Every structure is written in C-alpha cells, then in structure tokens.
Image: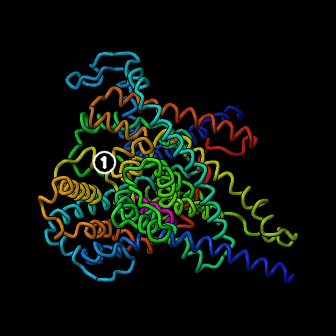
Amino acid sequence: MATAVTEIQTTLQRSSLRKRRFQRNMALLVLTLPALLVLIVFKYLPMGGLVMAFKNYRPLLGIFGSPWNGFDNFVFFFRSALIWQVTRNTLLYNLSFIVLTPIVAVTFAIMMYEIATPFFIKLYQTVLFLPFFMSWVVVSIMLFALLNSQNGIFNQLLMNLFGLQPVRWYTEPGVWPPIIIFAYLWKTAGYSTVIYFAGLMGIDPTLFEVASIDGASRMQRIFRITLPLLSPLIVIMAILAIGRIFFADFGLFYQLPLQSGPLLPTTDVINYFTYRALIEIRDYGMAAAVGLYQSLMGLILVIVTNFLAKRVSNGEQGLF
Amino acid sequence: MLQTQKNDRIARLIMHAVLGFACFLCLYPMLLTIGISLTNEREIVLNGYHVIPRDFSFEAYRVIFDKPAALTSAYWVTLRVTFFGTLLGTWFMSMAAFALGRRDFGWRKPITFIFLFTMLFDAGIVPTYMLITQYLRLQNTLLVLFLPIMITAWHTILLITYMRQLPFELIESAKVEGAGEFYIYTRIAVPLAKPALATIALLLALRLWNEWFSALLYINERSLIPLQFWMQRVMREIQFLLDFEDQMGGGIDLSQLPTETARMAMAVLAAGPMMFIFPFFQRYFARGLQVGSVKG
C-alpha cells in the first residue's frame, strides 16, 4: 500500500518535472525563433532551389516545372576551358590566405601580448583593425592611387627610385597574385589578430608565471605554452576557412582589378564566373550547378579536415 | 642577468619595429587617399600624388556637394539599412545566443547545429537570387539590403561564447522569483553581455555599411541605391568618360573636372563615418571577440 502511494507520487513528480522541463525548453526555443526563421528562409530554403542544377531552367515554367536534364549543366560547365582556370585561381588564393592569415595574425597577437603595455596594445590593435573598416570598393580606389599608370605611387617609385620602366598594372596579369594576396591580408589580418589576441587574453596568466619561475625563456614560453594553448582556436578558424575554400571573396576579385578583362587569367574566380553566368549570360542551370559544386566540395573538405584534426589531437580539437 | 635584460630589450625593440611597420603599411594608403582628396587637381597633374597636399584645396568636395541629391539619397539608404539591420540582427542573434548558451536548454545541440551548418554548406547565389526575385519578390526594397545578411552563424557563435560565461546562479535565482525567460534576457543577460553586444553590433554595422553586392543583384531603383554601390557606379562612369576621351581625342573637355581628386574624396566620404564610431567600441573588442567551443 505504502509503496504504491510513493510510486504514484514519484511518477507524478517525474511527469511534472518533465512538463516543467518541456515548458523551459519551449520558452527558450521561442527566443531562438526570430534568428532561426531568418536563417531558414534565406539559407535553408535556397538549398531546395539547388535542384535547378539538374534542370533545364525555363523562366515561364518555374524552378519545379522546368524539365530535368540530368547532369547536362555539369557536363557543360566541366567542359568549358574556364572552369579549370577559375578553380585553380580560387583554390590557390584561398590556400595562401588560409596559410598566411594565421601566420601573420598569430605573430602580431603574440607580439602584442608580449609587449604588454596597455598604450601600445591599444594603439597597434586600433591601427591594424582600421583597414577592416574599408569596403572593397573603397580599397579599390585606394589601390588605384597606388597603381594607376599616370600618377600611381608604385610607378613613381619604380621610375624615380629604381630608374625602371613604368608598369601598366591594370593590363598586366602576372603582377596580380601578390597584389591580391597582400590586399587581402592588409584588410583582414587585423581582424584575425584581434580574435587571436582575445584568445590569448583567455589564457590563465599564472601558467606564464610558473613557466618564468621555472626559468623558461621567452621563446620557450611562446612555443611550449602560448602556441599550444592557441592551437584549438587556430584549428577552428582553419576548418571554417577550408569550408569556404571554393568560395572566393567576390568583392576582392570584382572590385580591385576594376573588372579589367586582360587581368582575368590571374584574377578570375569561381564566384565571378557564377556571377557572369547568372547576370550576364542568364544561364541559371549552369550557375546553379557551379554553386552546388562549390558547396559540396567545401562540405566534404570540412568533414575530412575536422576528422583529421580530431584524429591527430585524439578528439580534443576540431569544430564538431 | 644583465645579458637577459639586454636580450629582452632587443626583443621588445624588434617587436615594436615589426608592429610599427605593419601599422605604417595599414595607414599609408588611407593617408594618401585623404591627402590626394585635399589637393588641387592641377597640382596632381604636374607633380603627382603626395600624402601631404602641396596645394591644399577643397575643390573635389565642392564638386561632389555641388549636386548632392544622389549622394544624400545614397547616404540615407545606407543609414537606414545599417540602423535597422544592426538593431534587428543584434537583437535576434543575442536572444538566440542567450538560449543556446544555457546549459539547461535541452534542445540547444540540434538548434546550434542548424546555425552552424549554414557556415559549412551554402546554396550559393543562384537559388538565393531566384528565391528573392521570383518568390519573395524583394527586389527593389529596402529589406533586401539587410534582412538576408543580418543573421550570421559566426556572430551568433561569438555571442554564445560570451553568454555561456554569464553567472548561471543569477539566472536561476531570477527564475525562482518567477521571472520569465524574455525578462531574464532583457534585464540580466543584455546588461551583462554589453561587451559582446557592442562588438557584434559594430561588426554588423560595418558589414551593412559596406554592403554593395546585394544592391548589385537586386536594386535598380535609383532612390534605393546604397552608398558603396553608388560610389562604385560613379567610379565606372568616370573611367568610362576618361576612356572615351582617350579614344575620341578630347571630344569632351574633362580637364576642368577634378576626376582624380574626386575619386579619392568619394572614398573618404564613404569610409569616413564608420571610422568615427570605431573608438567607442574598441575597448570591448578583446572580450567580445572570444571564440569558444562551437560544439555546444
């Protein structure tokens, strides 16, 4: 008798507990809904539109009414001579960004941390961050001041300082890879520096004190403590960047070369190709096929890198 | 001991030199742009560009402000886009982050994954373009300039990292006293998360202020052209006129127009306002930009 009563009581308690937990979950879910809804509409709904990649799109029939054409869009796009050039450019640029950004930003962040004077930290952080404030349109104008063939600073330097012939920068594709890479680092390295610096601020300072009591030199401290503690953050940032490796920063490649045709061999990227297919040629099916190719390759790479990062670190690192 | 002190001083000197040089590289193009925009056009034709104007002149700005209708319209569009986008984006994302940062939220893992997945897989511009133009019919609206880009998984994750560090006992005790989740969010989480909110608001404002790609795709109504896109179009027109003059051998006399300096003046006008806001947000950065574990 007594046991039956307590049993009923515990079931009642448990169900009320479950009810309360459900209510709390619902209340918190409601708070996520506005943001979730925006993402579902603008990020998830378009994924359904990817079926266009397998269709011969006719505006009058709509996406779902248009006839299927299997892999025709992909065949057409993989046969075009441009695809290898734009893929190569996109991958090589992004790869150099993925490698160079952490090298530059982590170096700057560690230097700022080692200098440790609040005034200088603030000064360097502010100035290095400033280029991040410029849109690519503004950066393209600034770059024009450096590169234009009449008055550009680069040509002034070449002629007056080194006695060389002026270069016609906007028609000379060979000079653009370093310009693009430098411009990208110029604009974004400050932002990454602040992220890594914020990561360093989260490290327990007593670790460094213990190390210096134990007689560790500055270099030992940096390589044995600072870098290993920063590595999870570096890995997360790298995996996220690898997921975007087939996507170029459109503004960088569209604005800086001022859409100059002769530069395309070294400045054309997949996104620019898709943009032209969409806006200029209006070949929606092929443009969608290119998009699907970019996203799938990115996703596969993220899963592979994440797996490798976990494997190497025994499950301690990685994004998910 | 003396040796290590001396080494230390040399090391510090090297670090200052490296960072100082990097700062110089960051500042030089900006100072040059400002310098050119304040120089007399004739002086540039004669002597080229200089950071410090040799022949100081407001001519470029005077020409731009001579017919200010297009410029003020572009500013007004960008101001509204930046204001509404930053406000709504920061609000929605911080509310979501408040919930997703809570350990007692049973569904946080799958929902966090819905956010995270948008960083790993992107349908690309074509389906998005079709959705916005064919189904939602948002082309040539103010909404299309901020709604699709104001929520990002990356910023939400930064906010979650911060929200997770809020004292849980405070939230618990508020709940014991009968406070609802929304009340706790506005009265407890928002004031405590100010550094993160300020940082995200600035990053979002920056992104919206600098946005031109949505306009390139979706806007052809004159009254809805935002600042950066307007500027890019004017640049193209200037270039077109210059090329035209080159080919036609001076059919139109452009030498009277300060084209070189006007370009730079426009860049200053487009980037300037954001630079003034920055110092007010800067002190929150080191705390607001911490990236924690994304796994939830």
Q: Is residue A302 above or below residue A135?
A: above
Residues A180 and B245: in front is: B245
How many numbered circles are shown? 1
Q: Is residue B58 above or below residue A32?
A: below
Q: Where does the image place residue B6, in percent across and percent down from the top left?
A: 79, 81
Residue numbers of the magenta segment:
B189-205
- Residue located at (53% from left, 49% from top): B100
Q: Where does the image place residue A293, in percent across and percent down from the top left?
A: 46, 30
Residue labelled with disc 1: B214
Mark 1 chain: B
Residues A277 and A201: in front is: A277
Residue type, label 1: Ser
| Residue count near mark 1 (Cα–Cα under 10 Å), binned few <14, some 14–19, many ≥20 | some
Residues B90 and B276: in front is: B276
Q: Where does the image place residue B144, in percent across and percent down from the top left?
A: 28, 47
Q: Where does the image place residue B29, in percent across and percent down from the top left?
A: 42, 68
Can you see residue B139?
A: yes
- Residue located at (27% from left, 44% from top): B217
Quadrant position of residue B109: top right
Helix, strand or loop at label 1? It is: helix
The overriding secondary structure of the stretch rendered in magenta is helix
Image quarter in which the N terminus of chain B is found: bottom right
